[in-house]
């Protein structure tokens, strides 16, 4: 196994906002609490310890006991759940949708980053306990985002109609997906393990929540991962006072709107990830999950026949907190209210919207967690490594856009010089003399001289392109091989981790894949990982 790294800003796949955050630009410091370094966690531990009630720990422990009632739990996970009752225990959290069969490969990277950071923190602060947590997004309702996974260039899709929270969905119809997967693979040890994992998760559990918990527990239970389902009445009871501030005072709307405006003013390159609503809660009941809106003195649910006065809605919230589902703005607060959490680990898009939330947390008097960009990786097989070495392709070049990648390589391997930069510089120097001459004789000719300069420079650029195109034809076989290997490693001209499912690599490496990822992914490295297996 060979491990290499590349700064995130050199990959070309991460936003200006995230790159600036990683570089700790001064302009962004008002939008987060502490930057993720081991030393900075000391202050985060102290702040969370002073604000997190012991009573919340008891509620969390009881809820987890109930949620794990039908799950075979590892000794390490059992120990972690018990430790959550102790005031010296803190969590590190990542969250993810209930994607079918984990969805994109980065699902693994998120959780491994979370587990590895917990281990690093334990070494640095041995008198405390640190529990890695996977927050299941059971209340999401965008079924089309999670109902498939990619396998060998095909989409294996769960075809059914769906509404409401995806975690409530019955696993009906997944037998067909299993049969398709089984048909695509053979009967080696790794292939049988994959089939068994899918079958046990999705054909022997009734809901998508139960199936996902089983799957994540099978993959990472031995590492002590604790899986939390926020769709829980007792946990949501802790959210009631904060939900009231959001719904009746519109605290979240005002604070996040102000922060988003300030963040956008820092740089035109920063894209605002989410915009808050006046009310950031859905109503979750009878197979629906729809927005709650204010309508004059009344409150209503979009596209449903539920209406309340303020007093009635407050009573509904007090009596049935499980019916109130936080959206993308309110969910991070919910997480921090019910968990003794220090750090949230997420992708670039997630961190972008978390950066809009700090002032809302301050208004709600909840500590804002450390924000850590999850590990990203490119996994290169031994066969692919051989191809790259044979073609003398460097890792940084692989991250170039395909046209730039090919052009650069053709220029480097061509037996003739396709770079006309010296000729362009010489031409520019000649015209500089003509400009001076025209200015001394007849200034009216300056425009004609400039036009001729532009024309000739364009002509040189055109000849350069034609020569490059001719060399591409001449070196067609090399171009084809380069294109093929880049398409293998960057499917759809995107990062491998966003398209691949772990199953393709698992077929080749089995459990060694997970072991290798644990060794390679360093959560605080601040760099993109290239892993040659």
Image (spheres, rainbow, N blue to C red):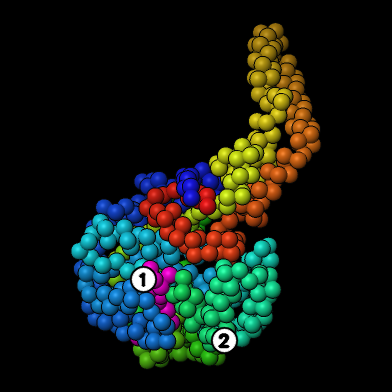
| x then y, percent, for residue 487 | 66, 51
> In the drawing, does residue 174 fall left or right of residue 526?
right
Residue 263 showing in the rendered view: no
The image quadrant that residue 132 belongs to is: bottom left
Query: Residue lying furthest front in this view?
Result: 188
- For the residue labelled by badge 2, is the local secondary structure a helix, a strand or a loop? loop
| x then y, percent, for residue 25 | 39, 46
| x then y, percent, for residue 497 | 55, 58
Against 398, is 145 above or below? below
Res. 170 mark = 2
Q: Nearer the viewer, residue 285 or 75?
A: 75
| Mark 2 / mark 1, whichever is N-terminal | 2
| x then y, percent, for residue 513 | 50, 60
Please give the name of the residue rendered at 68% of the width and 36% of the height, measured from the top-left corner.
407
Q: Which residue lies under the disc numbered 1?
A: 224
Against 85, is 440 above or below? above
- Report crowding for label 2: few under 14, some 14 to 19, many 20 or more residues within 10 A (C-alpha): some
The image quadrant that residue 90 belongs to is: bottom left
Look at the image and say whether residue 362 sits in the magenta stretch.
Answer: no
Bounds of the magenta span? 220-236
């Amino acid at each position: 196994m060979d491990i290499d790294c590349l700064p995130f800003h050199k990959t070309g796949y991460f936003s200006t906002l995230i790159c600036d955050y990683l570089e700790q630009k001064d302009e962004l410091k008002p939008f987060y609490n502490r930057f993720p370094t081991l030393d900075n966690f000391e202050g985060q531990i102290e702040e969370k310890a002073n604000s997190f009630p012991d009573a919340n720990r008891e509620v969390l422990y009881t809820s987890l006991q109930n949620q794990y009632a039908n799950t075979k739990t590892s000794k390490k996970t059992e120990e972690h759940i018990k430790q959550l009752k102790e005031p010296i225990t803190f969590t590190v959290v990542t969250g993810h949708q209930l994607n079918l069969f984990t969805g994109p490969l980065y699902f693994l990277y998120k959780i491994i980053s979370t587990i590895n950071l917990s281990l690093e923190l334990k070494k640095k602060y041995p008198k405390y306990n640190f529990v890695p947590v996977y927050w299941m997004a059971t209340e999401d309702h965008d079924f089309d985002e999670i109902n498939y996974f990619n396998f060998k260039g095909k989409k294996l899709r769960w075809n059914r109609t769906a509404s409401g929270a995806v975690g409530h969905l019955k696993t009906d119809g997944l037998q067909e997906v299993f049969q398709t997967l089984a048909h695509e693979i053979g009967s080696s040890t790794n292939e049988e393990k994959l089939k068994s994992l899918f079958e046990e998760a999705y054909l022997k559990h009734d809901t998508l929540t139960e199936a996902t918990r089983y799957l994540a527990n099978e993959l990472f239970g031995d590492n002590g991962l604790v899986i939390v389902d926020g769709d829980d009445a007792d946990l949501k009871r802790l959210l009631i006072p904060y939900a009231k501030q959001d719904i009746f005072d519109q605290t979240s709307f005002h604070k996040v709107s102000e922060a988003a405006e300030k963040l956008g003013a820092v740089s035109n390159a920063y894209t605002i990830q989410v915009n808050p609503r006046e009310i950031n809660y859905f109503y979750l009941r009878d197979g629906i999950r729809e927005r709650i809106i204010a309508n004059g003195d009344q409150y209503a649910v979009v596209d449903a026949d539920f209406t309340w006065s303020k007093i009635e809605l407050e009573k509904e919230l007090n009596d049935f907190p499980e019916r109130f589902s936080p959206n993308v703005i309110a969910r991070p607060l919910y997480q921090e209210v019910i968990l003794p959490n220090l750090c949230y680990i997420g992708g670039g898009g997630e961190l972008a919207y978390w950066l809009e939330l700090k002032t809302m947390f301050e208004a709600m008097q909840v500590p804002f967690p450390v924000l850590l960009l999850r590990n990203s990786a490119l996994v290169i097989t031994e066969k692919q490594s051989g191809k790259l070495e044979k073609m003398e392709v460097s890792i940084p070049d692989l991250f170039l856009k395909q046209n730039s990648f090919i052009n650069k390589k053709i220029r480097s391997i061509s037996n003739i010089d396709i770079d006309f930069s010296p000729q362009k510089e010489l031409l520019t120097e000649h015209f500089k003399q003509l400009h001076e001459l025209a200015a001394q004789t007849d200034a009216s000719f300056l425009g004609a001289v400039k036009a001729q300069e532009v024309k000739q420079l364009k002509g040189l650029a055109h000849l350069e392109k034609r020569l490059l195109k001719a060399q591409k034809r001449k070196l067609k076989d090399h171009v084809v091989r380069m294109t093929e290997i880049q398409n293998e490693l960057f499917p759809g001209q995107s990062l491998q981790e966003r398209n691949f499912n772990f199953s393709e690599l698992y077929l080749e490496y089995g459990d060694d894949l997970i072991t290798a990822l644990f060794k390679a992914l360093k959560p605080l490295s601040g760099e993109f990982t290239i892993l040659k297996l």
